[in-house]
Image: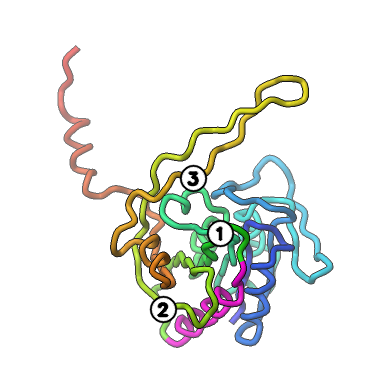
Amino acid sequence: MHILLSNDDGYLAEGLAALAAALRPYADISVVAPDRNRSAASNSLTLDLPLRAHVADNGFIKVDGTPTDCVHLAITGLLEPEPDMVIAGINHGANMGDDVLYSGTVAAATEGRFLGLPAVAISLVCNEEPKHFATAAEVAVVLLKRLLAKPLPQDTLLNVNVPDVPLEALKGYRATRLGQRHKSEPVIKQSDPRGRAIYWVGPPGAEQDAGPGTDFDAVSAGYVSVTPLQLDLTWYDRVNTIRTWLSEETSA
């Protein structure tokens, strides 16, 4: 088993190092990660500039691109042999609910799935600085063992969120759906040294749909949230509605 690891916090991130160390006894590990923090890069792919990959002092391969660039490059030409699975993380913070649309960690896993590999994104849910990377690393080991013993369908993409608590404090694992946040907080307006307006993107909105069955609910109760994601965004129940809408005559 050859596993590709990546992230969006950069090749020096503590979570990435913890993940690599935990998984090495169970698989051949290759790490290809951004050369700096690329959080919230989503699924962006660099098309107008060449990408450069270098082996860093810690043995990981760093790339001057996005998380998606890293995984794409690794699978389509950089690594030999090609990996059998992609695991992204351990992210320094939650990737629950609407977060998955922006997350570079989830995007790295998604790119692996786009390219035909089973993929897992794993995040440590914390309010401030994350502490218990060892807990999330052990969760990754548990899930890897289960995937090896009983593989899921090839198109599987799992989004995993782990409470930032000691391992013994975890209550278990729950299969969940994505919750939903309220609208993001307003942008923060400031001025640069020349008096010109600058803007910082505001923090994410508070939990809106965080009821039973959601990733928010599972994590808040002390459980690991495991959410299966699909890449087909088609809203199938609305296809016939749109077909009818398109065929109806409209008045001038």
Residue indicated by mark 2: 171
Measured Cα–Cα span from mark 3 to mark 1: 12 Å
Mark 3: few, some, or many residues within 10 Å (few <14, many ≥20)? some
> Which quadrant of the figure has residue 249?
top left
Residue closer to the observer: 66 or 96: 96
Mark seen at residue 123: none
Q: How is the image coloured?
A: rainbow
Q: Is residue 139 magenta?
A: yes
> Which residue is identified by label 3?
204
Residue 244 is a magenta residue: no
Q: Report the quarter where the C terminus lies.
A: top left
Image location (x, y in percent) of residue 187: 54, 33
Q: Mark 3: which amino acid?
A: Pro
For the record, the magenta segment spans: 131-149
| Residues at circles 1 and 2 in contact by the CB criterion of under 8 Å | no
Frontmost of labels 1 and 2 is 2
Mark found first going from the N terminus, 1 or 2: 1
In the displayed structure, 233 sits above or below 106; it is above
Disc 1 target residue: 93
**Taking the image as drawn, is residue 184 in sight?**
yes
Total marks in image: 3
* 26 relative position to 212: left or right: right
**Residue sitting at x 22%, y 44%:** 238
Q: Position of residue 146 (x, y in %)?
A: 45, 83
Q: Earlier in the sequence, mark 3 or mark 1?
A: 1
Mark 2 or 3, nearer chain start: 2
Mark 2 lies on a secondary structure that is loop
Disc 1 residue type (three-letter):
Gly
Can I make out residue 155 in this image?
no
Give amino acid for label 2. Answer: Lys
Query: Does the residue at mark 2 contact the one at mark 3 (Cβ under 8 Å)?
Result: no
